[in-house]
Image (cartoon, rainbow, N blue to C red):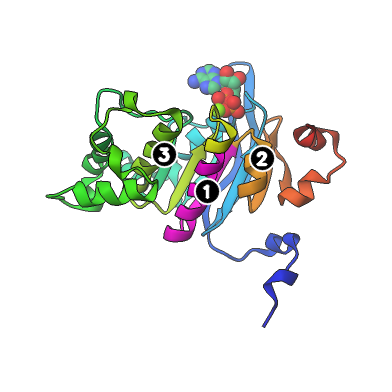
Amino acid sequence: MENQDQIKPSALKNDSRKAVIEIRDLRKSFGDNHVLNGFNMTLREGGNLVIMGKSGSGKSVMIKCVVGLVKPDSGMVKILGKEINNLDRGAMDELRSDIGFLFQGSALYDSMTVRENLEFPMRRHKKKLGVIKDTEPLVLEALENVGLAHTMDLMPSELSGGMKRRVALARTLILKPKVILYDEPTSGLDPITSKEIIELMHSIQKKYGTSSLIITHDVDCARVISERMILLVDGINYAEGTYAELSQSTDPKVEAFFKK
Ligand SMILES: Nc1ncnc2c1ncn2[C@@H]1O[C@H](COP(=O)(O)OP(=O)(O)O)[C@@H](O)[C@H]1O
Ligand SMILES: [Mg+2]
């Protein structure tokens, strides 16, 4: 048997795990603003992939193309083996229930309690979950995963920024997604709270075996969480590798990310 410790990071290049998200030659412009110019990536089953890019480099646009919130000009996006271009609305909706999307910011509904926020996706995706008479056990399980069972009947305004982010994560978990997309999960949080969120992301991945796509401009977040990383520069997957590999690069555009 092979010793796991002896497998070099670059051995991941011959990764044979099934692809859960594939993006090929993705292009998107807004007028003269050419945001994505042929972006490629593959997220594999159980893997976690960090996409790092400067602010305004097109990270959110890319992830919105994945969930169908932005329509690409061209290119292919395949999720769980299905090319999303070919899906009608119903099929896309069904696929969405397998994808958890943690938006930039927490995007909780301010006028709803924590419980109601978590019940919301259950109502939207009845097809996946069936009719649930008592939502409380599911809400409770999701909240327990993020250590916030006691906040069930609070309003978002009664929570701190870090707690809101955790509730948003719990809301993502309620549908037991196969893939979770995180858009800047630690932005705007202090270092200690950021660390807590990163630990939660790890524990969720372990517990449910989810695959994660993590978008961040935070080098520390990338270092702690990434299995592989892609640097999004000039609208393309400019460089790709492990944190250890990329942080030693002498390419000026890559070095720029790691300079303190
Ligand atoms: N709906 C939109 N209409 C026009 N321009 C947009 C739209 N969404 C994003 N952009 C532009 O696309 C570029 C990339 O934005 P974004 O993906 O949000 O960057 P980030 O990497 O910080 O997430 C920015 O120049 C932004 O102004
Ligand atoms: Mg963004």
**Quadrant of ligand 2 in image:** top right
Query: Residue 68, can we see it?
Result: no
Q: Which residue is mark 3?
A: 166
- Asked if the stretch drawn in magenta spans residue 69, the answer is no
Residue 176 place in picture, x, y as percent: 35, 52
- Asked if the stretch drawn in magenta spans residue 208, the answer is yes
Element under disc 1: helix
Q: Earlier in the sequence, mark 3 or mark 2?
A: 3
The residues tagged by marks 1 and 3 sit, at their Cα atoms, a distance apart of: 11 Å
Closest to the observer, 183 or 195: 195
Closest to the observer, 83 or 142: 142
Instruction: Inspect the image, locate mark 2, and give the three-letter code of the amino acid beneath it.
Output: Asp
CB of mark 1 within 8 Å of CB of mark 3? no
Instruction: Inspect the image, locate mark 1, and give the three-letter code of the amino acid beneath it.
Output: Glu
Q: Which residue is mark 1?
A: 199
Residue 259 place in picture, x, y as percent: 80, 33
Residue most extreme to the bottom: 1
Q: What number of labels is visible?
A: 3
